[in-house]
Image (tube, helix red, strand yellow):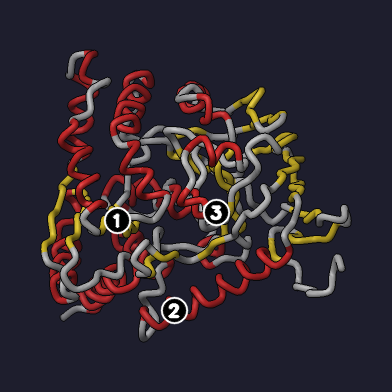
Amino acid sequence: MSDFHAMLGKYAELVIKVGVNIQPGQVLLVQSPLETAEFTRLVVAKAYEAGAKYVQVDWDDERVTRIRYETAPDDSFGYYPKWQADMMEQLAEGGGALLHIKVPDPELFRGIDSSKVATAVKAAAVARQKFQGYVRSNKVTWSLIKAPTRAWADKVFADLPEEERLAAMWDAVFRMNRVHSGDPVEAWQEHIRKLKESQERMNAKRYKALHYRAPGTDLRVELPDGHLWLGGGDYNENGVYFIANMPTEEIYTMPLRTGVNGTVTSTMPLNLNGRLVEGIKLTFKDGRVTEYEAESGREHLTSLLETDEGASYLGEMALVPHSSPISRMNRIFYNTGIDENASCHFALGSCYPVNIEGGTKLSKQELLERGGNVSLTHVDFMVGSAELDIDGELADGSIEPVFRKGDWVKFNPKAGE
């Protein structure tokens, strides 16, 4: 067996044992691009070896997606099949697991009318509201992972000869997921332990607000009472630990919906459903986006903000040190699931109920009353850099440093007392 195929097998085992953490008798749905079929078949085999009862693969072909946007009638884009939404709901209600190999082509919708994409994205979000509620409250085990495709490799490694790009992309995916280590599963367990240390540090502080400062950024973000920082992974309702995003380098919580004021500027391009948006600048007042700019793709940002009322408010804030392994690769991956783990980030749209005490038992209205945000969408954008400073404001009004020059300040347990 070649080294590459050995690594591929280790990666497949990792996402099954650590990512979705398949349990004996569990049903697994794998959403996969056609192009990653070799890897996906290994994932299926590892799932059955782990005791999965049944594995369904839902194949995706971006060429077929592109054909729809080029040739389908206008009324196609407001349609989302109810049977598809029903299937996802049944998967969650039956205690199943979802593994999504998510690698959208950053140039997929170049030249396509942005209103078509926005309409289709919203139709899917409306139809899948119930399932997304299950996802955000951890009723269903889920994990988003990455596997290289030609279009993605060509974009990320455009500086390399064409014949070297795919191999370079695979090597990057292996490295960011610690597959090169002798025992990737053990390496992940140690990584999760370190993330938990940062999570516990922030939860112990109970900051009233965080203040972000960097070139183009001066933003104060309040935190709701009872907020919870999480990191690495979480437990589903049956007590099974899973990793929702591989790789992951973040700890995250929810901001107070109406407590965001100031201006923030993005530091990386955003791949928004196959459409690139660059140079985002947002101004907030009492939580809501009141002004916005983008160096390119502004119309796509407009479509996002117009999704619904909640799309103009923040639902997530995440801390990632600039010295993270992905950041040290010094490369933009045009994939939010990766780029967000090289950079501190925020998300426009829905919060995760797990980020507030008792949140998974709250109705949407109760969540709003506790300071969380509700929306059909949830889109992360990156704001971290080597120039980012973050201060924490304690309940007594005292201020202490949390990040300096993009990285954690050494923890002083007595600071602020």
Q: Residue at label 2?
A: 189
Q: Quadrant of the N terminus?
A: bottom left
Quadrant of the image occupied by residue 255: top right
Q: Compared to 31, does 50 lie above or below?
A: below
Which of 136 and 80 lies nearest the eye of the viewer?
136
Q: Compared to 37, does 377 lie above or below?
A: above
Res 67 seen here: yes
Res 145 seen here: no
| 234 horizontally vs 40: left or right | right
Q: Which of pointers 2 and 1 indicates the residue nearer the eye?
A: 2
Residue drawn at x 36%, y 50% is: 135
Which of 194 and 217 lies nearest the eye of the viewer?
194
| 380 horizontally vs 24: left or right | right
Q: Residue at label 1?
A: 148
Q: What secondary structure is marked by label 1?
A: loop
**Which kind of residue does numbered mark 1 sit on?**
Pro
Residue drawn at x 24%, y 59% is: 95
**Which kind of residue does numbered mark 3 sit on?**
Asn
Q: Compared to 132, does 92 lie above or below?
A: below
Which of 235 and 274 lies nearest the eye of the viewer?
235
**Which kind of residue does numbered mark 2 sit on?**
Gln
| 365 horizontally vs 107: left or right | right
Q: Compared to 78, does 169 lie above or below?
A: below
Q: What secondary structure is marked by label 2?
A: helix
Callout 3 environment at 10 Å: few (<14), some (14 to 19), or many (20+)?
A: many
